[in-house]
Image: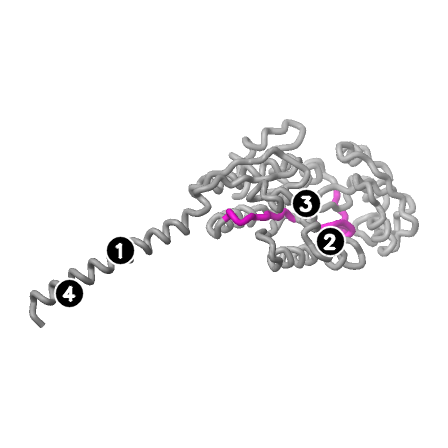
Amino acid sequence: MNLRKSSRLGVLCLALLLPLAACTANEQTSTNESSKNVTLKIARGDRPVEQALAEVYKNALEAKGYTAQINKSGDDPFKQVQDGQADVAIDQATTALFLSKDSAGVTGDDGVLSVDDLKKLRSEINDSDQEITALDMSPADAGKELVMSEAEADTHEVDSLSSLAKACSKLTVITDASDTSNLAAALETEGCQAPKISVVDSSDIDTQLRASVDRAVAVSAGNAIISDEGFKSISDSAKLFNAEPYLLLAGANVDDKAQDELNKVTGELSQQTLVDLNRMVNEPGAMAPKEAATRWEWIIE
């Protein structure tokens, strides 16, 4: 081929390819930065630990170049995502039950939500036509379990749910749940006839536990008081209550890379990490959620 013609052909090809390459590059940049062109709003619940976790998620997003802000704490963070008032929401997974078309089918006959039930709920949300993605659930479970002082457990010879059922005529179960029907039914299933259940305010639970005489107290498994003050968790009693792993919901503005970062944080929320975080943000000596979030890296080590 003539060298001059070859050179001209090369220049023509290059001229045609350059705009195409630039176009492709612009498309990639636009796609990769789509979520970085908006401020991602994070909704959180009222519990101190959820407020701290929201700060942790915000920090993780900002470290990857996203702009994030935290909405004022509210009772329905998941609904804020559904209504478009937030892009990310953190709460206990059971509070997403309203997104199910068949909530009774999720909970089953016993009315108690297990981790498997919540996985089913997560799949249902992701298979729906809503522009909402249910991200990973945390390994940590903030669900309740029955707790006693070591002395009370020894006195009543309680070391498991079955032995608690045998001693239940002498014991009162203390809870902060206003509806005790599922708990009563579950205790009866375990062999505790006519269980005595007393409802107290949530703020009084720790006091009830410290002053416990002839009682077992329903306490979140993430409550640092259990290990810090030497109380005894009753084996298998968690199955009497809803499982409460933490779950994130993400709206349409949250791209895949942002979802990956959020899932990474959630995966680091182990049971011990949840206990440590609760220890920092609850009384006595509670620190601000934002300050607790700055210590995230060392509590997950």
Q: Amino acid at mark 2?
A: Leu
According to the image, label 3 marks what residue?
142
Mark 4 to mark 1: distance in Å? Answer: 17 Å
- Residue range corresponding to the magenta coloring: 232-254
Vertically, is 169 above or below 119?
above
Mark 2 to mark 4: distance in Å? Answer: 69 Å
Q: Amino acid at mark 1?
A: Pro
Between label 3 and label 2, give the one nearer the viewer: 2
Q: Position of residue 75 (x, y in %)?
A: 68, 38
Mark 3 to mark 1: distance in Å? Answer: 55 Å
According to the image, label 1 marks what residue?
19
Q: Position of residue 166 (x, y in %)?
A: 88, 52
Q: Position of residue 295 (x, y in %)?
A: 53, 35
According to the image, label 2 marks what residue?
113
Mark 3 to mark 2: distance in Å? Answer: 13 Å
Marks counted in the figure total: 4
**Left/right of residue 5 with respect to residue 122 in the rendered view:** left
Residue most extreme to the bottom? 1
Residue most extreme to the top? 285
Q: Amino acid at mark 4?
A: Leu
- Decide which of 301, 157 is in the foreground and name it: 301
- Decide which of 172, 203 is in the foreground and name it: 203
- The reply to whether dot 4 and dot 1 touch (C-beta < 8 Å) is no
- Decide which of 286, 89 is in the foreground and name it: 89
Between label 3 and label 1, give the one nearer the viewer: 1
According to the image, label 4 marks what residue?
9
